[in-house]
Image (tube, helix red, strand yellow):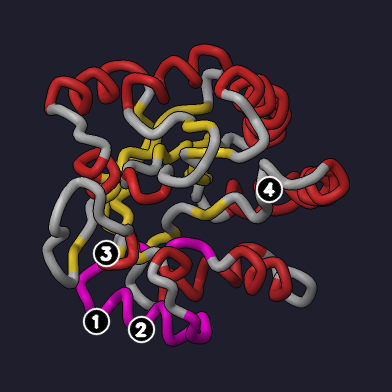
Amino acid sequence: MFSSLAPLALPLRVPFDRQLALARAKGFTALDLPVGHLLARLRSEPPDRIAESFAGAGLRPGGWQLPFDHQADRAAFATGMRRLGRTAWLAGCLGSPWCYHWIEPASDELTFAANTAKHVARVRPIADVLGEHGCRLGLEPIGPATLRVGHRHHFVHSIPVSLDLLAAIDRPNVGLLVDCFHWYTSRGTLADRRHSARRRSCTSTSTMHLAAPPSSASSTACGCFPAGAG
């Protein structure tokens, strides 16, 4: 288990060198991969030189966000899939097998069953490409009720139902990213957390709040998210 600063989750938009410096200064042991920046660097330097940037700052590579929306239209999804192999290869070279993305908790177009079918159809090929490079995918359920209000169809937003989705996806390298904030706001229990750890939890994160959430229906906007991966 180790702590990793995830700038995209904050969101923190500063240059890579500044991200490294902030992660080290704040006591993190890793930094999540800024995939776009690192792929650009790959045009002029090999992966071992990129790895030296982390080592020089006393950090290890953390996880990385899936670099496209797996729920996007077909054209955007196909484009993302074509680029995924190179990203996963680089992540594998850097010793960072932890890819992650979130599960949208509601939809105005897709029923629960249709949304499940779409996730199965989209996540399976993603998992297969990641698996070719020794990577795995953590899917994060999003808990706050405020993000479901006003939408026609609610979807996966808690650990127990997320585990059912993983069973439908049926890929050994797909698990849950369990964020303590979203676990809390989904009214999750300790039993849920223990059950996910025994079954399919591949990454855990903790949330450091700038202000305490007023209720389980809180917006995620009050939190910042340093991922602890392991």
The question of residue 215 being in magenta is answered with no
Q: Earlier in the sequence, mark 3 or mark 1?
A: 1
Can residue 136 be spotted in the picture? yes
Q: Earlier in the sequence, mark 4 or mark 1?
A: 1
Left/right of residue 62 with respect to residue 84 in the rendered view: left
**Element under disc 1:** helix
Residue stretch rendered in magenta on the structure: 13-33
Q: At 40% from the left edge and 19% from the top edge, which residue is drawn?
A: 163
Image position of 184 with respect to 62: above or below: above
Quarter of the view holding residue 114: top right
**In this image, 194 relative to 138: left or right?**
left
Label 2 SS? helix
Residue position marked by numbered label 3 in the rendering: 223
Toward the right, the furthest residue is: 75
Residue denoted by label 1: 25
Q: Amino acid at mark 2?
A: Ala
Task: List the residue tagged with mark 2.
Answer: 21
State which quarter of the image contains the C terminus. Answer: top left
The three-letter code of the residue at mark 4 reads: Trp
Q: Earlier in the sequence, mark 3 or mark 2?
A: 2
For label 3, the crowd category at 10 Å Cα-Cα, with few meaning under 14, some 14 to 19 and many 20 or more, is some
Q: Residue at x 61, y 64 (%)?
A: 35
Q: Residues within 10 Å of mark 4 (few under 14, many from 20)?
A: many
